[in-house]
Structures are given as C-alpha cells and as structure tokens.
Image (cartoon, rainbow, N blue to C red):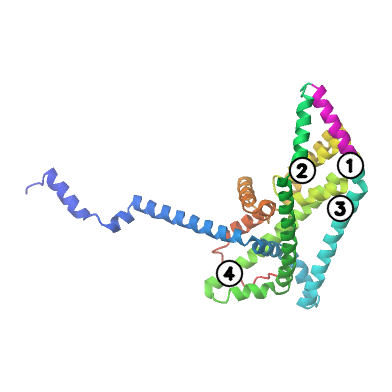
Amino acid sequence: MRTPDKSGARVSGAQSAGPTTLRTLLTDKLGWLGLRSGQILLSLALIGVIVFLLVQVKLVVIPVLIAIILASALSPVIQWLRRRGMSPMLATWVTLLTAIIVFGGIVTLIVVAVENQWTELASSASDGVDQLITYLTEGPLAVDAAQLEDFRDQGVVFLTSSQFGSGALAGAAAAGEFFTGLVLVLVILFFFLKDGDVIWAFFLKPFKGERLQRGRRIGTTTVRVLGGYIRGTAIVAFVDAAAIGTGLAILGVPLALPLAVIVFLTAFIPLIGATVAGILAALVALVATDWVTALIVVGIVILVNQLEGNFLQPVVMAQSLKLHPLVILVALTAGTIVANIIGAVLAVPIAAVAWAIAKTWNEPALTRKPQLE
C-alpha cells in the first residue's frame, strides 16, 4: 500500500475542513469575540440612550425614585398599622402626616438656631476674615495688600454684574423646580404607600410562570434593600450627628445644631459626605473661635467616622449594602454627573438594588407576593 505524501495529506486536511463560510467566521474564536463585543457595545449604547432620555425628564424621574426609596423605608410602619386594623387609606395618612411633622420640626429647629446665632457667627466671620488678611499680608506668605484689594474689587464687580444676576435667576428657577419636585414626591409617595403592592401587581400582569416569580423577587428585593439602606443610613447618620453635635456644643462652637443636622444629611452620601461635613464644622470653629478648637473638631470628626466605619456601620448596614468602596465611588461619580447632589444621594442605593437583583435573578420562586407599601 502506498503511503500518501505530505502534500496529499495537506490536501486531504484542507478538504476535510471544508470551505470558509460566514457561519465559520462567526463561530470561531475571533468571530465569537467580535459578536460579544458588538453585543456589549450595543447594550452600552442602549443604556446611554435610556439614561439620556431619563435625564430629559428628571423633574419626574427623580421624584419617583425618591418616593420609591421613602416608601420602602416606611413600609414596616404601613404594615404594622395595617396589622393593627387600620385601613390602607388611614394608615397612609397617619404615616405621611407624621413624617411631614417630624421633618417640619427639624427644619424649624434649624431656622431658629440659625436666627439666634447668626449675628454672633457673622461677627466672628468678619473677625476671622480680618485675621486671615493680616496673616496673609504680614505673615510668612507676605501677600501684597494691593492684590487682596484687587481680589475684593473683582468680587464686588461680579456681585453687581449681569452674570451674577443671571445666576440669581437660575437659582430662582432651580427653587421653582425644587418645590415642584417636592409636591410630586408627596403625591407619588402617598400612592406608593397606599397602593404600592397593587401597582407592582399591575405591572406583573403580562407575566406568568417563572417570569412572574422573578418579578415578585425583584419587588421584594427592591423593598428590602432600599428600606434597609435608608433605615440603616439614618441610624448611622443620627449617631454621627449626635456625637459631633455634642462635641461642638461642648467646645462652644456656634451653630452646633445646624452643623449636626448637616452632618446627618451628608451622611446619606457615602465616603465623601462625612468628610465634607467635618471640613465645614472645622471651618466654622476656626472662624468663630481659634485654630486649637478647629483642630479638636477635626479630631472629633475623625474619631466618630472611625468608630462608625469599623463598628456601627458593619452591624447596621450588613444586610443592606454589600458593595466594594470602588463601586460606591464610581456610582457616586456617575450620579453626580447625571443629577448633581440628588444623583449622588440616589446613586448608591440604586447600585445596591441593581446588585441585589442580579444576585436573586434565578433564585427559587417565592411563596409570597412583595409588599411595596
């Protein structure tokens, strides 16, 4: 028997491989990589278009997101009142009015505290500015007094210019949008508290079987993560505000109560919120008292943040927010770019919900329906 030569073997191998077709180009390793890359790019483009469209109607989207988060946080209260025999309407009104009264009382305390100490703070601020100018002109920096005078004159020119006026008009427009959004939040929150489960069940009507169970898992997961995140963050923020506010009051720093409230509010922005509040408190202490008190305030803020991060937050937030700090930082950046401060506040809970939904996407079916009250 004659053994085929090398050229014959090559010919036989080429014939057995078959001709190159579109199918083979798409199913080999390079083709598979190209298809996946195209799908990823198409998905990113679709997400970008959706985000762009949502930004265009953010006056509606943001109130809806805020209402969903607040409704999730208040869900245990609604369920408790319903178990005590209250109708959905009465339980909703009791919960909503109580929340409004509490929030209004906090705002009133802030306004009263600011009014009572504003004169003292303004005088201290004026003295602090004078001390700063003296230090800059007579200290080691030796800044020319004429340069400081030019800087002051530029500020006066800006305040009297049309550019500042247009900025004031923009601020008035932003205030109008704020109050419009606030009304929308209250209205939407009322319906979410009253009929949240009914609304979610309506959206799930087209689905059956496994898809219906997945939709219920999504609803349950969303309420659990958002509610736990807000309640846990509120507990952490209250402890931070109480500790820092007490320290400021003991040191005699003006506006201790408003600064404590600012600490509470900024705590809802992870990573950077506490830092910003600490810097503000230290600046007020520096202007109103002296640099020694300011350094003590910085030490108090650092100590409270360390205790919170190492002891309190892992216990309170363990089941609500399991995200790597890098993910939180990226979410904060993206949220700030899209919707400024509101975006920074909403970005982290939205990212936490997205990750929780991804983990529960294929879990076994639930035996009970989600409660979105």
**41 sits left or right of 327 in the view:** left
Total labels: the figure holds 4
Q: Nearer the viewer, mark 3 or mark 1?
A: 1
Image coords of residue 158 (percent x, y)? 74, 41
**Residue position marked by numbered label 1 in the rendering:** 121
The residue shown at (86%, 53%) is 110
* Mark 4 / mark 2, whichever is N-terminal: 2
The residue shown at (72%, 66%) is 184
The rendered magenta stretch, by its main secondary structure, is classed as helix
Q: Dot 2 surroundings within 10 Å: few (below 14), some, or many (20 or more)?
A: few
**Residue position marked by numbered label 4 in the rendering:** 215
Amino acid type at mark 1 = Leu
Image coords of residue 180 (percent x, y)? 73, 64
Amino acid type at mark 4 = Gly
Q: Dot 4 surroundings within 10 Å: few (below 14), some, or many (20 or more)?
A: many
Q: Which residues are magenta?
A: 123-139
Residue 159, numbered circle? 2
* Mark 2 / mark 3, whichever is N-terminal: 3
Q: CA distance from mark 4 to mark 3?
A: 43 Å
* Mark 2 / mark 1, whichever is N-terminal: 1
